Image: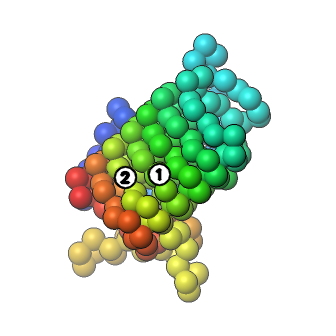
Amino acid sequence: MYKIKDLYDLNETIAAKLFDGVEYPWEVLANIGDFIIELGKTLPEDKFDHPQEDIWIAKDVTIAKTATLNGPLIIDEGTEVRPGAFIRGKVIVGKDCVVGNSTELKNVVLFNTVQVPHYNYVGDSILGTHSHMGAGSITSNVKSDKTLVVVKDGEEKIETGLKKFGAMLGDYVEVGCGSVLNPGTVIGRNV
């Protein structure tokens, strides 16, 4: 239920190779930054601008003047980055996504056609294709007692070894407005 093959269509991300050789999606969180740097070097110059070190942005992406973009970062084609967005780095944004006003992203992969359009915080998380986070919903990525995150699947407990781990949203997940997803939340496809 919580494995990559159960949650994500890897044809819907520029980052498909990031998931090679791992079983659980959270296993890639530590590798996002290095992966971006290596992938960025291979992106075609006729489709991607390289405005700063470790930042690659598709030429047709719309970015508001008040957005803050820090690398390493890749933003794929057709995406809109709205006013006040804060991308802190180690972020891959897929095709046709919306990164909205006052939304903060850190160490995340957004598959194609993801929407985080209004006042969202998404940290140490992976959002599958066509997932949507309603206004003001966030992924809490550190437990209040600072212990390592454990994923629970019924009675089974899966040790992640991670102190920072937000949420894994499968493809076509809808998160309601004002929701707070606890560290280690995994939501299956079409929920």
Q: For the point 45% across and 33% down, which residue is it?
A: 95
In the figure, 48 relative to 88: above or below?
above
Q: For the point 71% across and 36% down, which residue is it?
A: 54
Q: Report the number of discs.
A: 2
In the figure, 121 relative to 101: above or below?
below
Could you classify mark 1 by the number of other residues whose Cα lies within 10 Å: few (under 14), some (14-19), or many (20 or more)? many
| Rendered location of residue 159, percent (x, y) | 43, 71
Identify which amino acid the numbered label 2 is placed on. His
Identify which amino acid the numbered label 1 is placed on. Pro
Mark 2 = which residue? 132
- The reply to whether dot 1 and dot 2 touch (C-beta < 8 Å) is yes
| Rendered location of residue 17, percent (x, y) | 46, 35
The secondary structure type at the circle numbered 1 is strand
Residue 144 is drawn in which quadrant? Answer: bottom right
Mark 1 = which residue? 117
Marks 1 and 2: which is nearer the front?
A: 1
